[in-house]
Image (cartoon, helix red, strand yellow):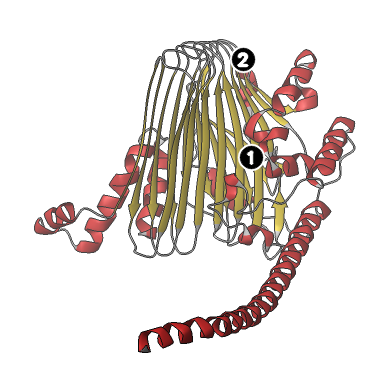
Amino acid sequence: MTSNLSKISTFISIPGLIIQNQLCKKNSSSKDVRCYSKKKKILCQNSSEKTKNQKEWLDSVLSVREQSDKKYLNKWRKVGVNLIKGLPFPSRSDESWKLTSLKKIYGMRFAQNEEKPDPNIIEEYIKSYTGLKIVFVNGIYSEKLSDISCSKEGIFFGELDNYQEQEIESVLEFLSKGESGINGGFFPILNIACLPEIYVLALPPGIDLEIPVNVIFISSNGNTSSSYNHRLIIIAGEKSKGKIIEHHIGLDNSEYFDNTAISILGKENSMLDFYLVNENSNLSTCIHSIHAEIKDRASLNFSTISLGGSFNRVNLGVDINGTNSYCSIKGASVAYNNQISDFHSRISHNLPNSKSSQLQKILLTDKAHGVFAGKIQVQHGAGNTDSDQLCKTLLLSSSSRIDALPILEINNENVKCTHGSTVSDLDENQMFYLQSRGVPAADAKKLLTIGFINEMIIEYPEELKTKIIKKLGFLM
């Protein structure tokens, strides 16, 4: 009897529990709706403020553009402005920017720079560079500081409208391609919208240039926050051989946005060594958009080292549009304090019988953040492709962070492709060995960190290599 009563009692109490639970759910649901509405309102406000900040930043960039009376330039600038205003601002919701915050860039506001740096200081700084010199100061070409006796060798450097008339149309078409062109995304399009000039550096067919060509972009703007949009097209003629070193230098603690776009064309049987050296100031932000195309039996050796800038991003794309062609990429990034150093690359094998090799080394300390996203593509029909990719990271601090994404995208069976990524700190056995030989701990750390990077700069000109090693020793 007791059992039956218990069952009846339980059964009778269930509707009450159901009503009570429903009431609780209703109250909870009401609270959830209120919370959701409040969160949504906050998110909308934050999104609105973020968009407003980005628009103010874009208006600020466009407001400091140099005026031009050249029709073809103004035509390109107009296209750039129309395109940029219809594009969404890059953010972490985009696949290509998901690992990188752009707050440092969007927080900048710009003004016209009326200050002119002392040419004597610049001359003193660049006098040790061997070879030919092409110098830009605060975005403007300086004939006085440049040494372009290269014209005696048949090398062309100048504004696009002074280049070979029959080649201008094809050069403009090439300029619009890849990572540095219209399809390259927001920042190369912004570069087009702000074009002060388009420059061409062309090595003639058959030349064997024994000395390097230094292209030097110097920024020194005192207390003014400035925006620079450099645009350079490099053409290596058939059977030409040469070395080009592109320097980005901040002479003082200037604040500026360096938005550079480079297009490189390696014609049949050409051999081009290209170096990108980032010594921007610690308050600068810089984005380098680079696209290279190499033809049959051509080779491109691309090497870069990044030492400066509070924010630095390299977007590199290489299209191997030739058979028996070769591309080598060596990249080194050194970041400290709160620096962000980001390297995105794409190597696309579009025709058969080509090779590529990529080695990236990243050295991080303090609260620095490093990013590597490297993609190797082997397209349909690109058989007998041989490609390898490796990213090595050395972390000197538990607060530093690395995001490494090596990617293979293969659409062909007859290929040989490898990729990988390693992350480590200083080797304790190596530290112990050096200290057991009487080397102080601080010096042992410097030796090992410089040794980590040294492989990447071994082929640099001696004066530049010495300068980089000295700076590395100071940072460590």
Q: Position of residue 45 (x, y in %)?
A: 74, 70
Total label count?
A: 2
- In the figure, 95 relative to 214: above or below? below
Which sits in the foreground, 291 or 283? 291
Q: Quadrant of the N terminus?
A: bottom left
Q: Residue at the left extreme?
A: 436
Dot 1: within a 10 Å radius of its alpha carbon, few (fewer than 14), some, or many (20 or more) residues? many
The residue that label 1 is drawn on is 135
The residue that label 2 is drawn on is 204
Residue at position x 51%, y 15% in the image: 298
Residue 251, by quadrant, is bottom right
Which sits in the foreground, 4 or 42? 4
Q: Amino acid at mark 1?
A: Val
Q: Position of residue 201 (x, y in %)?
A: 65, 26
Residue at position x 45%, y 12% in the image: 353
Which sits in the foreground, 322 or 16? 16
Which badge, 1 or 2, is on the more N-terminal residue?
Answer: 1
Dot 2: within a 10 Å radius of its alpha carbon, few (fewer than 14), some, or many (20 or more) residues? some
Q: Amino acid at mark 2?
A: Pro
Residue 145 in view: no
